[in-house]
């Protein structure tokens, strides 16, 4: 028996790991060589998905030549080290992988290759050497090159994964090449698409018009009265934009928290009818482009709006533009961000253990005393959390202040106007961006450090048999009087959005018309061209669907992968890694937008004006949502499940695919839906990044709003909302149902004991 | 049963989590066909040690060999080791058959062979006919057997068990541990078994490695550990012990004379030097006699009737002693004066 089982064991688990490792290495090396020998090395202006180059001069044309020909034909000798570093790893591929030299060689070639690739990219620009001291040292103008293209991309990937394979051979992260690769990829992407653009802003803030370092000018701009003056406290004049932003954020944070808490209590602690409807209504703003509510508010309360017309008719009060400015923005943001507070607080309210309230009551506290001394204090960290979230959202919001701000200037819009406005002061935009970033990061930091350790939520997984205490009467009345107007207003505003598109000219001509829909989405037919997309909106509509459709799965995938790293793997610096990945949540879209323009307008990574930059922007803007959905649901899965799969011989990539992914369907849906919806509705970063070829629905609508073409804007917005609902339904149908093929699968005990 | 070489070997293995050392400079060998238990209180490093064999943790330093091959840097996937998890870790979305066949499929066996081997594995644990069930449709004991079958069918060099009985109720535990032992003997498997339950360890093991605070406290057969614990910790952890202080006088050879109050005993000196030493006395090694007999005088403080035997707490000049007495004919009530005598077995000198 002994001998037979021993020989059998050799048969079942051969040296699979070793050959898999060799295949992985050869795959990446092959890809790298393909990149440098065959594919165009430099960025082509035809677009990432355009393959015109195949028939248009490749490989001998300067623009399309692969790396090797760039060296031989066009004397770009600085690419030679890359060839050497791609060749060296072949010397160790056939050595046993446990040999220390293998790891050393891979780490050296991968690290040095990546370093050299970026170094040459940043050092040699479109017009020769980049930077004063390089010019001084090596003489001007020096060699020139375009931004990196497919070839460079593949070579970079090859170097990165050679390095991470080497790292795993050293025993990094349980010796798992897939995990080290994922971490490496994540780090490089975050560095390139978050840190680099943000640091470019800082850099740009420090330079004067002649691109020289000027700390004095920076200090002057940073302390300028335009940002910090307080004259509104003692005069009619307006305060600095920083104070405006902060004051608005405090107001919005407070109102959204109160409203969110009211709804959370209403839904969980009262016998009120139609709870599902309330949940649905409060979630509506999530699928609404952020400024659409602002638009509806204009229709309702603007100069020509229903409210003013009524006042004029009834009391002869002349219509005015009172809604533009702080009241309007405050109102719009409250409507828009209350759902976020609601979602945070409903978890908090549900997390208050009923048995604690019962305990208080058996200790002779009345309902009101129980609420005041037990329930409310237990919710306090959650309430603070909701406030901070509302605060950050308000600071970062761009669409509503743009539509409704009037003369009330806030940071996010002033950043935009500093770039896009008449004066086009990049330095000022950068300084404003830094101030805004300072605010949001500080808030984010407070939220994580201070509230992170202060959660009283007492969900233990053990059954809590208690029944939540009924709310005291006075709280009930308070909630009702807050929530009812909100519901009425929400319904009215959405009614506006639905009907506004069918009215010829709001406030003036209220006859029914399909004109706006026809303008936007008309289809034509000609015998010559067949179907014609005549409507003005089709172009941006298809672009939006395409970009959102591409970015959603990538965002969800990268988000879940990161969540998997954060919950399931241990590696040095994980805390920092987590903070950094969640950081992009705290960076306002406006800042990402301006950072992307500064960073990616020039080589080595030149992607402005393409669809790629939009996709990339969405991925990194929305990834935190995916990460959170993933972290929350992975925390519920017993880690032994993955470990079991690993010890049964499945590599970690396979484990992720076959074990975790099927069990993570709900999180996957959530991540997909959120990233899709957020890509469809985003405006703040997008408005910097759209181009004639790639215009997005939101920026197109905003353009219509600026031209006071409200009818088309509203019509387009309601179409977007309907499309989003459809797509959400489709995603759910496609990903969600397959899981239900078997009985009782959801009742499995997934929690490990001990 | 003939052993055919060393299945697992640890050479000076250390595992650090940050600054905390979970396992410190540990070395041991496990022979093929042996069932070895890693035993110790929680946090002693036994589970970390097991997970290092599996490749789920990477050793910080030292060398790990499995079947004579250095696997120190090899990930779990590539080690010829299977593990039965505490929570069983059955994949909830896969049928019993898919669960058991998972490792075989991953090993790229052809489909008919996967089925055949999985069937054989299920038969071995007595679960033929349950192939199409989901794990959630099985009882705890059945789930555990599926987990065992899933690990077994890979015919691994070493099979690991991480506290496999802790999720079962007390009655079932005894039964399942006997099944595991039978299976191990029958198939001549090499098994490493982690538990914190000393009775379980004594019942299933060929050899036990007792761990304490990241190092090995003692290793040996269940018999050796129980009869001659070398340290205060092992004496106390495996079974019950009364730890009292006596005076040792080392004689020629391996033995010495220990003075315990009025008694003097000749015991192996365990390398201890003359002077004050700790003596471990098993509760069943103390005989209670009427005061007319010679022995250490004492007073019964507590007498508990437990059906099969009596538990006594007796106050003596050596301190309070815990006594287990199977002699139900002569029960001593609380307050009775007694004289204590020691049996030959169950008394040993231990290090502090």
Image: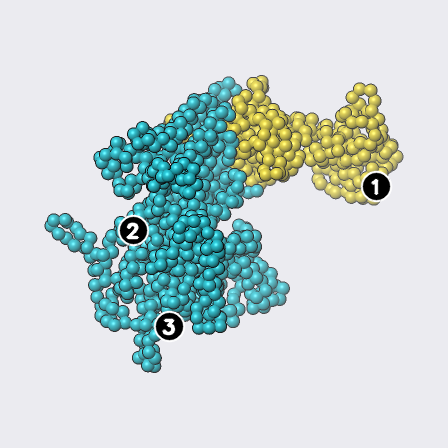
Chain colours: A cyan, B yellow
For image coordinates 58% across by 34% down, the residue present is B48
Q: Is residue A201 visible?
A: no
Q: Which residue is mark 3?
A: A322
Q: In terms of secondary structure, where does tag 2 sit?
A: loop
For image coordinates 53% across by 22% down, the residue present is B69
Q: How far apart are labels 2 and 1 at the CA level?
A: 96 Å
Q: Which residue is mark 2?
A: A691
Q: Locate the N terminus of chain B by quadrant.
A: top right
Do dots 1 and 3 share one subunit?
no
Q: Position of residue A291 (x, y in %)?
A: 35, 61
Seen as rendered, the residue at the extreme left is A527
Decide if residue A55 is on the left or right side of residue B24.
left
Q: Position of residue A735 (x, y in %)?
A: 35, 46
Q: In terms of secondary structure, where does tag 1 sit?
A: strand
For image coordinates 44% across by 73% down, the residue present is A236
Q: How far apart are labels 1 and 3 at the CA level?
A: 95 Å
For image coordinates 38% across by 32% down, the residue present is A78
Do dots 2 and 1 share one subunit?
no
Q: Position of residue B24 (x, y in %)?
A: 63, 32
User: Which circle's residue, 2 or 3, is located before the other in the chain?
Assistant: 3
Residue A389, above or below A326: above
Location of residue A283 (image quadrant): bottom left
Marks 1 & 3, CB-CB < 8 Å contact? no
Query: Is the residue marked by circle 3 packed among few (<14), some (14-19), or many (20+) residues within 10 Å?
Result: some
Query: Is the residue marked by circle 2 packed among few (<14), some (14-19), or many (20+) residues within 10 Å?
Result: some
Seen as rendered, the residue at the extreme right is B292
Q: How far apart are labels 2 and 3 at the CA level?
A: 34 Å
Q: Position of residue A465 (x, y in %)?
A: 54, 56
Give the chain of mark 1.
Answer: B
Q: Which residue is mark 1?
A: B299
Give the chain of mark 2.
Answer: A
């Amino acid at each position: 028996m002994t001998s037979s089982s021993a020989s059998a064991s050799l048969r079942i688990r051969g040296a699979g790991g070793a050959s898999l490792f060799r295949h992985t290495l050869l795959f990446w090396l092959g890809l790298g060589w393909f990149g440098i020998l065959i594919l165009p090395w430099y960025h082509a202006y035809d677009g990432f998905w355009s393959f015109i180059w195949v028939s248009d001069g490749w490989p001998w044309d300067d623009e399309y030549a692969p790396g090797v020909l760039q060296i031989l034909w066009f004397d770009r000798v600085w690419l030679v080290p890359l060839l050497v570093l791609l060749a060296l790893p072949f010397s160790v591929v056939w050595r046993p992988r446990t040999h220390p030299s293998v790891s050393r060689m891979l780490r050296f070639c991968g690290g040095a290759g990546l370093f050299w690739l970026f170094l040459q990219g940043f050092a040699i620009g479109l017009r020769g050497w980049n930077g004063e001291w390089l010019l001084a040292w090596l003489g001007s103008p020096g060699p020139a090159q375009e931004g990196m293209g497919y070839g460079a991309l593949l070579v970079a990937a090859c170097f990165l994964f050679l390095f991470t394979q080497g790292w795993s051979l050293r025993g990094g992260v349980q010796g798992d090449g897939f995990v080290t690769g994922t971490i490496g990829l994540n780090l490089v992407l975050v560095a390139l698409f978050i840190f680099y653009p943000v640091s470019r802003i800082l850099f740009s803030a420090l330079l004067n018009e002649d691109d020289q370092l000027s700390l004095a000018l920076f200090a002057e701009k940073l302390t300028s009265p335009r940002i910090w003056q307080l004259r509104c406290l003692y005069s009619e004049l307006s305060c600095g934009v920083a104070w405006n932003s902060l004051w608005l954020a405090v107001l919005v944070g407070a109102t959204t928290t109160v409203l969110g808490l009211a709804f959370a209590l209403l839904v969980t602690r009262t016998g009120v009818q139609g709870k599902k409807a309330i949940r649905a209504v409060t979630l509506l703003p999530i699928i609404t482009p952020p400024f659409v509510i602002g638009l509806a508010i204009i229709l309702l309360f603007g100069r020509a709006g229903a409210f003013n017309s009524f006042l004029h008719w009834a009391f002869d009060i002349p219509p005015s533009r009172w809604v533009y400015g702080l009241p309007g923005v405050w109102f719009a943001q409250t409507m828009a961000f209350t759902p976020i507070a609601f979602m945070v607080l409903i978890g908090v309210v549900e997390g208050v253990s009923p048995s604690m309230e019962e305990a208080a009551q058996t200790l002779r506290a009345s309902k009101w005393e129980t609420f005041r001394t037990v329930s409310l204090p237990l919710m306090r960290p959650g309430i603070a959390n909701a406030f901070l979230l509302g605060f950050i959202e308000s600071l970062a919001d761009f669409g509503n202040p743009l539509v409704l701000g009037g003369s009330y200037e806030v940071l996010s819009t002033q950043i935009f106007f500093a770039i896009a406005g008449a004066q086009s002061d990049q330095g000022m935009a950068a300084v404003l961006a830094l101030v805004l970033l300072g605010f949001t990061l500080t808030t984010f930091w407070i939220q994580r450090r201070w509230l992170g350790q202060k959660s009283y939520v007492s969900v233990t997984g053990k059954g809590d048999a208690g029944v939540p205490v009924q709310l005291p009467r006075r709280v009930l009345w308070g909630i009702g009087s807050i929530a009812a107007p909100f519901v009425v207003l929400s319904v009215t505003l959405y009614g506006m959005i639905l009907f506004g598109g069918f009215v010829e000219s709001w406030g003036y001509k209220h006859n029914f018309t399909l004109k706006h829909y026809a303008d936007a989405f008309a289809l034509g037919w000609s015998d010559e061209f067949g179907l014609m997309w005549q409507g003005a909106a089709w172009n941006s509509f298809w672009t939006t669907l395409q970009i959102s459709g591409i970015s959603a799965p990538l965002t969800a995938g990268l988000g879940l992968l990161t969540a998997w790293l954060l919950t399931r793997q241990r590696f040095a610096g994980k805390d920092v890694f987590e903070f950094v990945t969640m950081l992009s949540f705290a960076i306002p879209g406006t800042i990402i937008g301006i950072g992307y323009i500064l960073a990616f307008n020039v080589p080595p990574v030149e992607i402005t004006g393409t669809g790629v930059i939009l996709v990339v922007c969405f991925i990194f803007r929305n990834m935190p949502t995916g990460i959170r959905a993933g972290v929350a649901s992975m925390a519920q899965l017993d880690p032994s499940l993955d470990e079991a799969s690993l010890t049964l011989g499945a590599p970690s990539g396979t484990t992720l695919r076959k074990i975790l992914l099927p069990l993570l369907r709900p999180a996957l849906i959530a991540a997909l839906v959120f990233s899709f919806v957020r890509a469809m509705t985003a405006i703040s970063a997008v408005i910097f990044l759209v181009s004639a070829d790639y215009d997005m629905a939101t920026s197109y609508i905003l353009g219509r709003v600026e031209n006071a073409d409200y009818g088309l804007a509203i019509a387009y917005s309601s179409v977007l909302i309907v499309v989003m609902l459809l797509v959400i339904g489709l995603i759910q149908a496609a990903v969600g149902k397959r899981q239900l093929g078997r009985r009782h699968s959801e009742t499995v005990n997934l929690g490990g004991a001990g | 049963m003939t052993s055919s070489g060393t299945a697992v070997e640890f050479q000076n293995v250390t595992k650090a989590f940050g600054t905390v050392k979970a396992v410190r400079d540990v070395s041991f060998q496990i022979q093929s066909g042996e069932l070895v238990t890693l035993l110790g209180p929680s946090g002693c490093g036994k589970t970390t040690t097991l997970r290092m064999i599996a490749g789920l943790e990477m050793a910080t330093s030292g060398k790990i060999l499995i079947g004579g091959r250095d696997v120190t840097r090899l990930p779990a996937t590539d080690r010829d080791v299977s593990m039965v998890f505490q929570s069983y870790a059955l994949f909830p979305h896969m049928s019993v058959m898919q669960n058991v066949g998972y490792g075989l499929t991953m090993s790229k066996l052809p489909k008919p062979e996967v089925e055949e081997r999985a069937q054989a594995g299920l038969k071995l644990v007595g679960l033929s006919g349950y192939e199409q069930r989901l794990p959630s449709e099985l009882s705890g004991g059945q789930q555990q057997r599926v987990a065992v079958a899933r690990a077994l069918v890979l015919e691994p060099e070493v099979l690991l068990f991480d506290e496999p009985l802790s999720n079962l109720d007390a009655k079932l535990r005894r039964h399942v541990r006997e099944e595991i032992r039978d299976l191990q003997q029958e198939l001549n498997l090499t098994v490493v078994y982690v538990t914190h339950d000393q009775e379980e360890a004594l019942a299933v093991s060929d050899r036990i490695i007792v761990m304490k605070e990241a190092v090995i406290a003692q290793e040996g057969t269940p018999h050796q550990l129980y009869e001659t614990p070398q340290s205060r910790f092992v004496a106390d952890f495996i079974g019950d012990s009364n730890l009292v202080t006596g005076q040792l006088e080392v004689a020629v050879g391996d033995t010495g004379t220990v003075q315990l109050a009025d008694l003097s005993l000749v015991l192996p000196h365990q390398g201890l030097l003359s002077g004050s030493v700790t003596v471990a006395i098993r509760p069943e090694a103390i005989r209670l006699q009427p005061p007319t007999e010679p022995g250490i005088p004492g007073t019964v403080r507590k007498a508990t009737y437990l059906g099969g035997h009596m538990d006594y707490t007796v106050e003596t000049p050596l301190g309070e002693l815990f006594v287990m007495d199977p002699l139900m004919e002569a029960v001593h009530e609380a307050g009775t004066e007694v004289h204590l005598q020691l049996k030959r077995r169950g008394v040993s000198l231990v290090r502090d």
